Amino acid sequence: MLQDSFGRVATDLRVSLTDRCNLRCSYCMPPEGLNWLPKPELLTADEVVRLVTIGVERLGITEVRYTGGEPLLRRELVDIVARTVALTPVPQVSLTTNGIGLARLAAPLAEAGLHRVNVSLDTLDRETFKKLAHRDRLADVLDGLAAADAAGLRPVKVNAVLMRGINDHEAAGLLRYCLERGYELRFIEQMPLDAQHGWRRENMITADEILVMLKDAFDLAEDDTAERGSAPAELFLVGGGPARVGVIGSVTRPFCGACDRVRLTADGQIRNCLFATDESDLRGAMRAGASDDELAERWTAAVRTKKAGHGIDDPSFLQPSRPMSAIGG
Ligand code: SAM
Ligand code: SF4
């Protein structure tokens, strides 16, 4: 079991398959991109599957989410998913993606056994998309969403980050779009994880602000039936339900006390928190010949030292040196 010193147990593994991306969302990356990890440093598909197998079969991982960077850029993705759902016990397997390429890949991924997708969509306006993501790809994202739905990867979940003065007028419009298509929308507060360290608390659209905007346009009621557990989203019924919308107040309403996540970076480092400042190197150990037992022991030790919380509000808070795209969001 992956238990930390506060008694929390990690069962939800986020695996970054690449730090590369075909968008440049400004809350994540600078417009000119980043220096990508050199290929030899990336885990191979076999290495990813070996570590995920150790997590699932020995360490109690029940949920595996592939992310990045943009995971659809990883050519072996369908194969990695197929090998993950073949594990015993079968974990819940999902994908977080910007949706570009999903129009082509949704059906093969569903056939390989993928259970669900989260697609990021911050705006419905082509010009705003170009401004926010520095690429003219909104149509591809919307096509990808529709393809995920058609392939039965339901419920299709949508993640949106609102940025002040850029897309913060779109909260109601995004929700309407998702309600009309049966997608479940979640708004996520912008966190200090951008590569260029441009996050400012005063520019962040808070969960409270998001709820005010939504309540102006919709009848929202807290969903008492939803067992929140370790889920970060506070869920609200829209118009009496069953449709719902979620708000993830990662900064203003932290859920660290119930966190059940652990992360594996694209270059094989275990991080016990998005905001961790240290990592444990499984790739080096694996390539030096470590056995599955030794890798499991290293991984267990890495989780044991997880801190109580992210401490963004603490004056001593330090933004991690690795951005979200390299850690795996
Ligand atoms: N490229 C894929 C995507 O965009 O969905 C997967 C990786 S991305 C890092 C994962 C999620 O993190 C996305 O929903 C994105 O909106 C979110 N994200 C990235 N940077 C963020 C930040 N600074 N604060 C909050 N969410 C962020
Ligand atoms: Fe790429 Fe996702 Fe980061 Fe946007 S949020 S730049 S799509 S990794």
Image: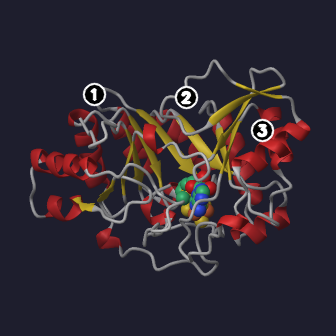
Nearest the viewer among 255 and 10 is 255
Task: Give residue 88's mark.
Answer: 1
Q: Is residue 201 above or below residue 224?
A: below
Reading the image, the residue beneath label 3 is: 178
- Across and down, in percent, residue 173 comes to 86, 46
Which numbered disc flags the more N-terminal residue, 1 or 3? 1
Label 2 crowd (10 A; few <14 / some 14-19 / many >=20): few
Secondary structure, mark 3, is: helix
* Residue 101 visible in the snapshot: no
Of the residues tagged 1 and 2, which is closer to the observer?
2
Q: Quadrant of the N terminus?
A: top left
Reading the image, the residue beneath label 2 is: 228
Task: Using the numbered discs, state the Cα–Cα distance from disc 2 to disc 3 in whole angstroms.
Answer: 22 Å
Q: Say whether marks 1 and 2 touch (CB < 8 Å).
A: no
Secondary structure, mark 1, is: loop
Q: Quadrant of residue 180?
A: top right
